[in-house]
Image (spheres, rainbow, N blue to C red):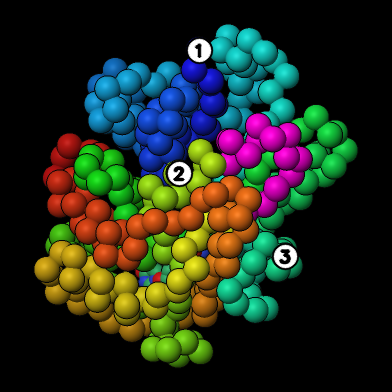
Amino acid sequence: MAEKVLVTGGAGYIGSHTVLELLEAGYSPVVIDNFHNAIRGGGSMPESLRRVQELTGRSVEFEEMDILDQAALQCLFKKIMKAHGVKNLVFSSSATVYGNPQYLPLDEAHPTGGCTNPYGKSKFFIEEMIRDLCQADKAWNAVLLRYFNPIGAHASGCIGEDPQGIPNNLMPYVSQVAIGRREALNVFGNDYDTEDGTGVRDYIHVVDLAKGHIAALRKLKEQCGCRIYNLGTGTGYSVLQMVRAMEKASGKKIPYKVVARREGDVAACYANPSLALKELGWTAALGLDRMCEDLWRWQKQNPSGFSTQA
Ligand code: UD1
């Protein structure tokens, strides 16, 4: 019987791509999501997962649930995870736990905790709790994945990132400018200590990132204790380089204006991804052109994301 994997937040951008990779790797994902940032499809399914089912020809178990609802979560565990002693965990962390980089590229030994924003702090606190848990109880195994900046979409163009409201992150905003949904990109500062003055990040294809989770699940099988890995490409690109890459992929001009820096932003952030290669056998395979081409295909096929109204 296929191994069950509980995926929290599995209807979202990273979640839906990961569920697809799990299905293709022969796992049987069970997804919970509270629709905080997901669109309903027909019936009880989120639209993203309805499409994942269509793409893979396999079915996904889904329950609408808030992960803070302890009673519901316990009930789910009883129902579908007959073995109650699940002590293997993959945690979605973020490169933002490194705070302002003291050196680059960032390896996993770089100090954490000096976070420049509350989101990063919450990831840092949870990492610390999981580390303590694994230290205190050797029956636990956990892989903490520090995501760099996931972008792009599944090659089918059927699933992708669909932020509600005005996108906070760079590439969803850029692609909405390319499709004509927004007038111009605001570039948050061009006076950073980088090649062209704009912020530099390690953008990684979301499908590569999703595959990183499969590698992490395999690692858990080794009774690995608590392990931490960067999921990045090792290459940083500036905001303006990203704009040009998206112009190339879309064939559209992307107007921008330079505005003030955004509070909490760092100048540059990119990974040393060699530990994941060494210990997980995982490395990012898809480059910048593919990321932008796939993002554009998703945007073009779904000008208003998962919702049907234009
Ligand atoms: C942001 C979050 C980070 C989170 C990550 C998830 C902040 C301060 N950081 O990281 O906690 O883990 O998203 O993907 O919110 N930019 C513009 N114009 C825009 C948007 C972004 O110029 O409209 C620039 C930013 O200044 C930055 C780069 O583009 O240099 C990337 O920004 P973004 O996509 O928001 O990612 P991060 O800031 O790395």
The verdict on residue 226 being magenta is yes
According to the picture, the residue beneath numbered tag 2 turns out to be: 211
Q: Can residue 263 be seen in this view?
A: no
Residue drawn at x 55%, y 49% as measured from the top left: 281
- Mark 1 and mark 2 lie on one chain; the one further toward the N terminus is 1
> What is the CA distance from the residue labelled 2 to the residue labelled 3?
23 Å
Ligand 1 lies in which image quarter?
bottom left
- Mark 2 and mark 3 lie on one chain; the one further toward the N terminus is 3
Identity, as a three-letter code, of the amino acid under mark 2 = Lys
Identity, as a three-letter code, of the amino acid under mark 3 = Ala
Question: From which residue to which does the magenta span run?
Answer: 216-229
Task: Label 3: state its secondary structure.
Answer: loop
* x, y percent for residue 287: 34, 63
According to the picture, the residue beneath numbered tag 1 turns out to be: 1
**Quadrant holding the C terminus:** top left
> 233 left or right of 78?
left
Q: Quadrant of residue 137?
A: top right
According to the picture, the residue beneath numbered tag 3 turns out to be: 109
Residue drawn at x 50%, y 60% as measured from the top left: 232
- CA neighbours of label 2 inside 10 A, class few (<14), some (14 to 19), many (20+): many
Residue drawn at x 70%, y 15% as measured from the top left: 84
Relative to 217, residue 150 above or below: below
Q: Does the residue labelled 2 lie within 8 Å of ligand 1?
A: no
